[in-house]
Image (cartoon, rainbow, N blue to C red):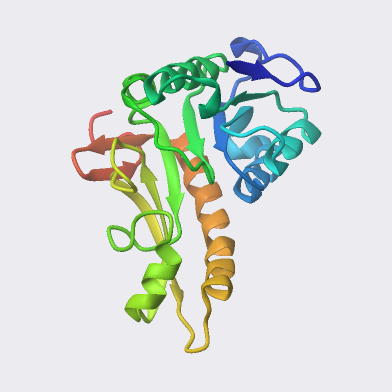
Amino acid sequence: MTSSSQPGPPPPDRASVPTHRLVVLVSGGGSNLGALLDAHSDPAYGARVVGVVSDRPGIAALDRARDAGVPTAVVALRDFPDRATWDRALTEAVGVFSPDTVVAAGFMKLVGATFLGRFGGRTVNTHPALLPSFPGAHGVRDALAYGVKVSGCSVIVVDEGVDAGPIIAQETVPVADDDTEETLHERIKVVERRLLVDVVGRIAREGLSVEGRRARLGRGPGR
């Protein structure tokens, strides 16, 4: 069951928002969401968060959205008989906001065929490692265990795989000899937020083209 929160206003009419429309998918504290909300208040940014959709109720990210006056919805997997039905409900909930781009910001679920059929090619995600190395939920831990000297973060186009989509942008973060998973992850998060905000803004202003494994900011030749 999809439920919209009461405190937020209804989605604005598409014609009333002359900027690129963002829907952000969240599962936790919402630090990446907060960075996008800070950026979208500047008209020059070119994009605005018009909706936030969570797979969990009662999380801090929903509070961030409500405090910013952004409408929210919760589509919890436990409320559906299977993942396919949940995926259809998630697609419908996101579709209510008519997004130009969907941003998975700490969203801890894989989207399915229905979602990708509607929003594929325009859904982006971040990962705290330099893909294709160390995909999955423990990228920072795995990188440290492997003994890398440089880690970082990636912004990718979401596909059906686990952190497997075309890479849009990456930035490196040095690994210190005394780093723990927590200390390294905190430094990566700082870079990750900045990179995500930059990439999403450039998508809004310049466009995104994807051809096979190659993703590039800008409309591409002849577009």
Residue 132, by quadrant, is bottom left
In this view, 193 is above or below 148:
above
Residue 86: give x, y in percent of width and height: 46, 22
In this view, the residue in front, 223 or 100, is 100
In this view, 66 is above or below 2:
below
Residue 46: give x, y in percent of width and height: 58, 34
Left or right, residue 159 beside residue 126? left
Residue 73: give x, y in percent of width and height: 64, 23
In this view, 174 is above or below 50:
below
In this view, the residue in front, 36 or 165, is 165
In this view, the residue in front, 15 or 106, is 106
Q: Residue at x 52, y 66 (%)?
A: 188
Q: Residue furthest bottom?
A: 177
In this view, the residue in front, 66 or 21, is 66
Q: Residue at x 49, y 20 (%)?
A: 80
Q: Residue at x 47, y 47 (%)?
A: 199
Quadrant location of the N terminus in the rendered image? top right
Q: Residue at x 68, y 41 (%)?
A: 61
Report how many numbered discs are placed on residues in the image. Answer: 0
Left or right, residue 223 beside residue 125? left
In this view, 127 is above or below 93:
below
Residue 32: give x, y in percent of width and height: 60, 48
Quadrant location of the C terminus in the rendered image? top left
Residue 13, by quadrant, is top right
